[in-house]
Image (tube, rainbow, N blue to C red):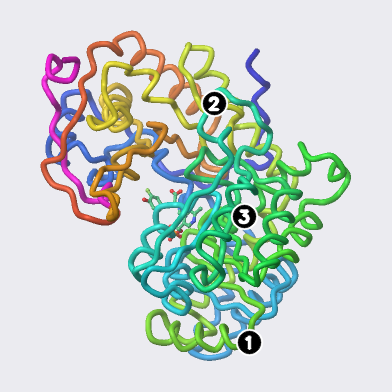
Amino acid sequence: MTPIYPPEPFRIKVVEPIRLIPPEERELKLIEAGYNLFLMKAEDMFIDLLTDSGTGAMSQEQWAAIMRGDESYAGARSFVRLEAAVQDVFGFKHFVPTHQGRAAENILAACRVKPGQWVPSNMHFDTTDANIRARGGRPANLVIDEAHDPENRHPFKGNMDLAKLRAFIEKYGREQIPFGMITVTNNAGGGQPVSMANIKAVADLYHEFDIPFFIDAARYAENCYFIKQREPGYESKSVKEIAHEMFSLADGMTMSAKKDAIVNIGGLLCVNDDALFQDIKNELILREGFPTYGGLAGRDLDAMAVGLYEGLDEAYLSYRLGQTAYLAARINEAGIQTIQPTGGHGVYVNAGALFPHIPNYEFPAQALAVELYREGAIRGVEIGSVMFACLDPETGLWHYPKLELLRLAIPRRTYTQSHLDYVADTLANIKDRAHSVSGYRFTYAPELLRHFTARFEPLALEVASA
Ligand code: P61
């Protein structure tokens, strides 16, 4: 049964028009962009679910805060206000703002990762993965096996596999692991939460070996709300209390504030270690800016200071996770498989199951991304072999991810129920002609983060199904 669509805990004061361009125009746009939706214009999208990152609607309080932005180079009032919010919500000893999450990752990797070293996590998202590799390091994903089974309803499918983590640390040793991570929620694995018990056990394990523990906190508030809903003992705790407990277990965090701090741009890097903080400040000054603005305008810092609290609001979180669950249920009703249980920030459609005739090296999830645009001018993002297949330097073999997914990420406070109904109906239409959809091949692909700039061409169907 479809869950009830949760009424939005806000009303709309400013509107942004969207336009549905005709099918013939969409076809031309696809060809021009080499079938890569990253290379298409936003104005040609009717519903844009490419990402929930930086695409949310800011509140009247955030816009008001923007007017208070202090653009002083050093020690701006905006920084002081952000510092108070960051201290209150996360509680680390030191922090710097960064222009977005990957800048925080880059600085941390630059300060600590040496060639050949390993950084384990449940699953690194692609920017974290690439920033570790860019320093010669090697990311390792040690999520529980249940995460790879789209039907498995484990309530915390983002959990780290503790036995794998222990074996990994024992194999490579403390010297080869400059820090360990965990991503909450696990974006690459379906926006799945990590339980507090797991975070605690992971922290204990890293600390047993004297390895600093960092949280990738992009969607920490959604993760904490899942803990409140699903983990015994947390029902009556506030999301903010749960967040406090979570961050008290870590030595630092990186965060893309474009997600749960509901800002259009911004990030954070927090640490407790004094010496590391000194290195971070030096690197930040070189790459991003002075430590009290970190590559952002003063007004961005103010918007973040307000957004950090709005992202923790429980009425908002209940609506947000309810909206995602509603879209997934409507898609499932059409007989289309999505990762179960539904994650926090988006619905992950199992494109591999929808197009069993397209092998992973012909990119079934990219094919679905193209079809969704063709059918309804909707943009999703491929999270499959285009994004994650990589050449293993040791074996020289291609390593393919276990699932071929199309992510429909829901921007915060932006789309309504009828928009989501339109998305579900469009997918149902594609299902009816699924057998006639072909795979793709690259005509251009860079080495790192190739999904951003790659170009494709469709394969003839008889080739794809041969
Ligand atoms: C996203 F197609 N995520 O999910 P930045 N950690 C985590 C993230 O989800 C994340 C970052 C760090 C995006 C944006 C995005 O290939 C892509 O502020 C868990 O984007 O630098 C970002 O934060 C990095 C979309 C990123 C992509 C890379 O849509």
In the rendered image, which residue does mark 2 sit on? 327
Q: Nearer the viewer, residue 367 or 304?
A: 367
Point out the frontmost of discs 1 and 3.
3
The magenta stretch is 450-466
Marks 2/1: CA–CA distance: 45 Å
Question: Residue 206 colored magenta?
Answer: no
Marks 3/2: CA–CA distance: 38 Å
Q: Please report the residue visible at 11 percent of the width from the left and 20 percent of the height from the top.
A: 460
In the rendered image, which residue does mark 1 sit on? 274
Q: Secondary structure at mark 1?
A: helix
Residue 259, compared with residue 384, is above or below; it is below
Q: Nearer the viewer, residue 113 or 155?
A: 113
How would you rate the neighbour count of disc 1 (Cα within 10 Å): few for under 14, some for 14-19, many for 20 or more? Answer: few
x, y percent for residue 402: 41, 34
Q: Quadrant of the C terminus?
A: top left
Q: Secondary structure at mark 2?
A: helix
Residue type at mark 2: give it.
Leu
Marks 1/3: CA–CA distance: 28 Å
Question: Residue 463 colored magenta?
Answer: yes
- Name which quarter of the figure residue 192 lies in: top right
| Residue 382 showing in the rendered view | no
